[in-house]
Image: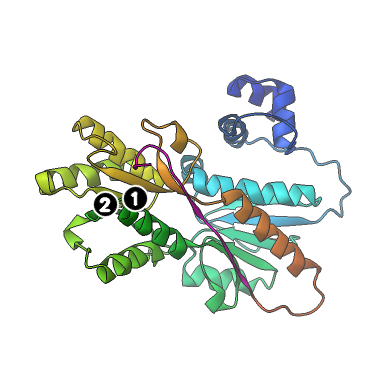
Amino acid sequence: MATIKDIADRAGVSSATVSRVLNYDQSLNVTEETRRKIFQVANELQYAKVHRKQPQQKRIAIVQWVDEADELSDLYYLSIRMGVEEAAAEEGYSVIRLFHSFGANELKNVAGIVAIGKFGDHQLKELKGYRLPLVIIDDDVLGRDIDCVVSDFAGAVTQVVDFFISHHLERIGMLRGVEKTSEGNEWADSRPRVFTTALKKLGLYHPEWVFDGAFNPTSGEEMMDTALAQLDDHLPQAFFATSDALAIGALKSLRRADIAVPQRVALIGFNDISIAKYLEPPLTTVHVDTEAMGHQAFARLSQLIESSEPVLAQRLTLATHLIIRDTTPR
């Protein structure tokens, strides 16, 4: 069994730091990168804390729609899960983690479920079928009578378009990540729709400036390579990337082509992952408070667990805001 010392040796920090991070000590002053590294190593070593609480301690299940390897490569979903676990620990709940698949055996003796991601119709029906308190994070499933926590994607994209227009950047393209549900169907992302509608109202929409791909840096790089090859001198003045991962790849492509950012091409990402501010140049992006999403989801789940009466489903939408850095004009 892995120990705190094993994690400390692998992460290059002290055992005391590991212990305090894993116990969500908010008084500890460490960087977000160090905190994430410790959780990543703990996951890789399959570390399990020994709970010294009484056997009757309540526990919840956290179900991720991605598998464990994908979660570690996508800080967005990892950060949401960490937010849920932190809030649960503060209230004395233990947690079991389930990745991509789940079943009745794994969900025995849990008080409720937090499910993170885009689950298909079959899996949503299966989750509801366990008749346990249930909250979904990152997908609007209120229409299915399921509690959910989402971010204000529509408001965020409106901020992005307004920012570009206010800086006289009217030739705007988009790098669109395509995401699929757990059952392989394309997820209806509202961001491209809002972007398209806003530009059409202004008479500025050009479909030839929209490029599709997977949500990863390699895809972002390939999309921008394609844009450079196809558009040449007609390259837009600005691009909105629907994730920071796409923006990271796009920046690599632009640097290789000696395209000045933001002087020739401005770029805005989405999510504000921890490395966004350390890119060269630092990335302007929409900040999504993933930790708060996790906290609020657990708070709602706790209400559902404690309620003795049926409760109407709710959708909680958290605000986003634009973080201005150096890939756009100031």
> What is the C-alpha distance between the residues marked 1 and 2?
15 Å
Name the front one of labels 1 and 2: 2
Q: Mark 1, residues whose alpha carbon is within 10 Å: few (<14), some, or many (≥20)?
A: many
What residue range appears in magenta? Answer: 314-330
What residue would you read off at disc 2? 169
Indicate yes or no whether the magenta region holds residue 317: yes
- Say which amino acid is labelled 1: Ala
Q: Quadrant of the C terminus?
A: top left
Q: Is residue 229 above or below residue 280?
A: below
SS label for mark 2: loop
Side (left or right) of 22 relative to 154: right
Label pair 1/2, CB-CB below 8 angstroms: no
Crowd tier of the residue under label 2, counting other residues whose Cα lies within 10 Å: few below 14, some 14–19, many 20 or above: some
Q: Where's residue 240, x and y in %?
A: 32, 52
Q: Does the image show residue 106? A: no
Question: Quick check: 319 above or below 20?
Answer: below
**Residue corresponding to mark 1:** 241
For the N terminus, the image quarter is top right
- Is residue 35 or residue 45 the one in the foreground? 35
68, 16: nearer the viewer: 16
Say if the magenta span includes residue 191. Answer: no
x and y percentages locating residue 22 in the rendered image: 70, 36
Label 1 residue SS: strand
